[in-house]
Structure formats: structure tokens, C-alpha cells
């Protein structure tokens, strides 16, 4: 609306005018950025100058042959690599512009959660597994903890399957249920980013499908970085994909581009099965 001589006038856009495509696209926000990341196990250099952007509320897949540095890189993002002695990281890792090396490590791992290759539930009840994060972060109000456990299990698409056995051992769950429980445990502290290290490699196709469906739901509230050996899984689930080889990021682009029109011969050879 505009006003001329005190009279409200509706402004009508000229239908012949077109809005540039870039003006209609939402701005992509980088949530995690690495700049020149090198990683060493003792004197052995496992990562070489990794520059990579992870976009907010997107799924980024990391692919490549075994031993190429994918999982090592993933572990640098929340400094879990520091649990291994005689290792060091060089370069910058930025979370929303903050250098993760300058953040309190407990706070960092609350913001950047992780799910490992094999389900690793604690030898506790289903309830206590999910409540663990809330309790170690100082929350003791039982009603609020119950709410967090239910919300997290719902987000992990597990609540309906376990709601009548929350006090039973988590170790009695199936492999796929245990992995979703581990995801619920990570979600209980509301991470901004979730790192997944081959989360489906130990699961059957049905459990894998449930995890993949879950990832699509979670990306509305959580950014995800996933290491996978399954290229079909990367193609199905991720908006962006990075190809690693011998500790280097060879190529990073939209997933469709990586799989249909890679710019590097090494990427094409791996995608087409010529090696790896």
C-alpha cells in the first residue's frame, strides 16, 4: 500500500516484470566451515588442507574408499579426535563463525552431536539412555526429563515402539532400534549439528530405510554430516556430497552434480566403480 494525498493506494506489480531467479532463492547459510584442515596421527598426515562448507539444515555426505580420511575428518568437527593420543589438528574449523578450538569442549559436543557406526547404547534402561545427556548437563527436574525423553524418542521415530518398555534394558532392542535410540540420545541435548559415521553399515535394509526416513525429518531442525560407503545412500539422502581420496577432498558439490557430472576424473572413476 502507498498513500497519495492521504488516500491509500494499492501498488500492483507489473506482470511483465520478472524477478531475477537469485532474488527468489533463500540465502544458503554456512553452519560449519573448515579452512586448510590438516590432521596428524603422530608424524603421519591423514588429512591435507581440507576446505569444506556445511550448509544449515542440509544433509552433507562424505564418500570415498576405506582409509581415505572421511571418518577422521568427521571427528575433527567436534574435537572427538582429541581422545586419541599423539594427534593434532591444524587449520580452522568454524561453527557459526566461532573457532571450535576456542570453545569449551563439553559445550561444543552438546552443539555438535555424534552417532557412531555401530549402535552403542549404555547398559542402562531405554529411559536412562536418553535422559543421560540432560542429567549430565545439570537438569534434575524429573518431569522435564520425562518430557525430553519422550520428545527425543518421538523425533527419532522410536517412541511408539518403546513407550511401554522404557524401563527395560536398551540392550534388548534390535540393532536398528538401538541405532535410533543412539540418535534420540544425541538429540536430547538439542544439537545444532549431528555427525553420523556410517550409521547404517551394521543394519539390515529395513532398518536402514527407517534411518534414512528419519534423516529427512530431522534436517528441518538439525544440520547433518554423514560418512557413508553406500553411494546409493548418499544419492538418496544428501543435498551435498564430498569425495575424499588419500586424505584429500577431491571434489565437493551438489549431490546430483557429483553423481551425474563430476568435474574430477578421480571422482568419476570412483562413482563408476573403476576403483575403490
Image: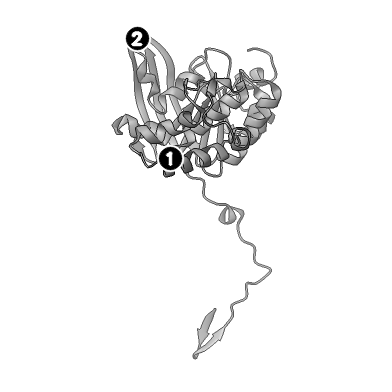
Drawn side of residue 208 relative to residue 224, left or right: right
Of residues 265 and 97, the one nearer the viewer is 97
Q: Which residue is mark 1?
A: 145
**Residue 30: image location, x then y, percent:** 46, 41
Please, which residue is most extreme toward the bottom here? 5
Q: Are marks 1 and 2 in contact (CB under 8 Å)?
A: no
**Residue 225: image location, x then y, percent:** 52, 31
**Residue 104: image location, x then y, percent:** 30, 32
Residue at the image position 65 percent from the left and 35 percent from the top: 213
Residue at the image position 48 percent from the left and 36 percent from the top: 187
**Residue 199: image location, x then y, percent:** 57, 24
Give the CA separation, mark 1 to mark 2.
42 Å
Q: Is residue 65 visible?
A: yes
Q: Identify the disc placed on residue 42.
A: 2
Q: Is residue 269 above or below residue 195?
A: above
Of residues 16 and 192, the one nearer the viewer is 192
Amino acid at each position: 500500500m502507498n498513500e497519495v494525498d492521504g488516500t491509500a493506494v494499492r501498488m500492483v506489480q507489473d506482470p511483465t516484470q520478472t524477478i531475477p531467479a537469485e532474488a527468489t532463492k533463500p540465502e544458503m547459510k554456512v553452519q560449519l566451515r573448515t579452512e586448510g584442515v590438516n590432521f596428524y596421527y603422530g608424524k603421519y598426515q591423514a588429512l591435507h588442507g581440507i576446505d569444506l562448507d556445511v550448509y544449515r539444515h542440509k544433509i552433507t555426505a562424505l564418500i570415498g574408499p576405506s582409509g581415505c580420511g572421511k571418518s577422521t575428518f568427521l571427528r575433527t568437527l567436534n574435537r572427538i579426535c582429541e581422545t586419541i593420543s599423539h594427534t593434532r589438528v591444524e587449520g580452522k574449523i568454524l561453527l557459526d563463525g566461532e573457532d571450535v578450538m576456542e570453545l569449551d569442549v563439553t559445550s561444543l559436543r552438546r552443539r555438535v552431536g555424534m552417532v557412531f557406526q555401530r549402535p552403542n547404547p549404555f547398559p542402562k534402561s531405554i529411559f536412562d539412555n536418553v535422559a543421560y545427556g540432560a542429567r549430565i548437563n545439570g537438569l534434575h527436574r524429573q518431569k522435564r526429563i520425562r518430557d525430553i525423553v519422550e520428545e527425543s524418542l518421538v523425533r527419532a521415530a522410536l517412541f511408539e515402539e518403546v513407550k511401554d518398555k522404557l524401563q527395560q534394558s536398551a540392550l534388548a532392542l534390535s540393532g536398528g532400534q538401538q541405532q535410533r535410540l543412539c540418535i534420540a540420545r544425541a538429540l536430547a541435548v538439542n544439537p545444532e549439528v549431528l555427525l553420523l559415521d556410517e550409521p547404517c553399515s551394521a543394519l539390515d535394509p529395513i532398518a536402514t530405510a527407517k534411518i534414512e526416513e528419519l534423516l529427512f525429518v530431522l534436517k528441518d531442525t538439525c544440520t547433518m554430516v554423514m560418512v557413508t560407503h553406500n553411494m546409493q545412500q548418499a544419492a538418496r539422502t544428501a543435498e551435498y556430497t564430498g569425495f575424499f581420496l588419500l586424505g584429500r577432498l577431491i571434489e565437493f558439490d551438489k549431490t546430483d552434480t557429483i553423481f551425474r557430472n563430476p568435474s574430477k576424473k578421480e571422482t568419476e572413476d570412483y562413482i563408476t566403480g573403476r576403483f575403490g
